[in-house]
Image: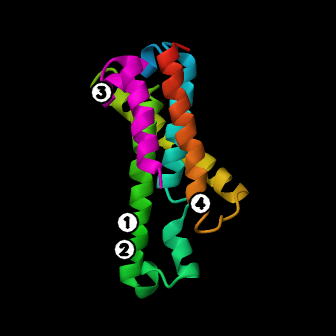
């Protein structure tokens, strides 16, 4: 599937706009001056959001869950505590991917100082943004039907096309 190229291309477009590959610099630039190249930035953030949705394993891209129904997949071997650990690992992956998206591409509300009050406020705001990402992902997941196993990879071409369009918009200065 084209998930990693979508992430790389969208982050590359943002790095080219900012002029640095440092994720902290990209986040700071998006927080302070988000309109450097508005069309390319919005398309790159949208493509990255699409890739994050796929990486989170939500329907119709939940291949690990769908494999059980199609061919006795890897999760059918597990039960009890081992299955709980696999499920916990999948949930942890979702949180890490969503946290990366929130930290880099939704940078408003970051703490500017190391004071206790500002850090607590930044953590609370981060958790609220993370909750919003999961609620939006759940709304999309519940409104989509699980796609056929072999056809879900075709849907990733849409995200890659959006990321490529963001790159073209960056090159043309839009």
Identity of the residue drawn at 48% across and 12% down? 36
Give the foreground label among 1 and 3: 3
Does label 3 or label 4 sit earlier along the sequence? Answer: 3
The residue to which callout 2 is attached is: 85
Q: Does residue 156 lie above or below 173 as drawn?
A: below
Q: Position of residue 26 (x, y in %)?
A: 37, 24
Callout 3: SS: loop
Whether residue 59 is visible to the viewer of this picture, yes or no, is: no
Magenta run includes residue 6: yes
* Residue located beneath label 4 in the image: 152
Residue 89 is marked as 1
Q: Mark 2: which secondary structure?
A: helix
Dot in front, 4 or 2 = 4
- Residue that badge 3 annotates: 21
Range of the magenta residues? 1-29
Q: Is residue 166 left or right of residue 142?
A: left
The 10 Å Cα crowd at callout 4, few under 14, some 14 to 19, many 20 or more, is some
């Amino acid at each position: 599937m084209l998930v990693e190229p979508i992430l790389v291309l969208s982050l590359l477009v943002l790095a080219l706009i900012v002029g640095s590959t440092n994720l902290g610099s990209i986040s700071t630039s998006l927080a302070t001056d988000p309109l450097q190249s508005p069309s390319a930035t919005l398309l790159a953030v949208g493509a990255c959001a699409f890739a994050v949705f796929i990486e989170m394993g939500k329907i119709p891209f939940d291949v690990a869950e769908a494999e059980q129904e199609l061919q006795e997949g890897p999760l059918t071997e597990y039960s009890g505590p081992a299955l709980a650990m696999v499920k916990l690992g999948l949930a942890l992956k979702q949180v890490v991917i969503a946290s990366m998206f929130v930290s880099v591409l939704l940078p408003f509300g970051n703490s500017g100082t190391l004071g206790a009050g500002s850090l607590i406020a930044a953590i609370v705001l981060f958790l609220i943004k993370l909750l919003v990402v999961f609620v939006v992902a759940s709304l999309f997941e519940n409104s989509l039907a699980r796609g056929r196993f072999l056809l879900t990879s075709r849907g990733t071409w849409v995200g890659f096309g959006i990321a490529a369009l963001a790159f073209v918009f960056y090159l043309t200065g839009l």
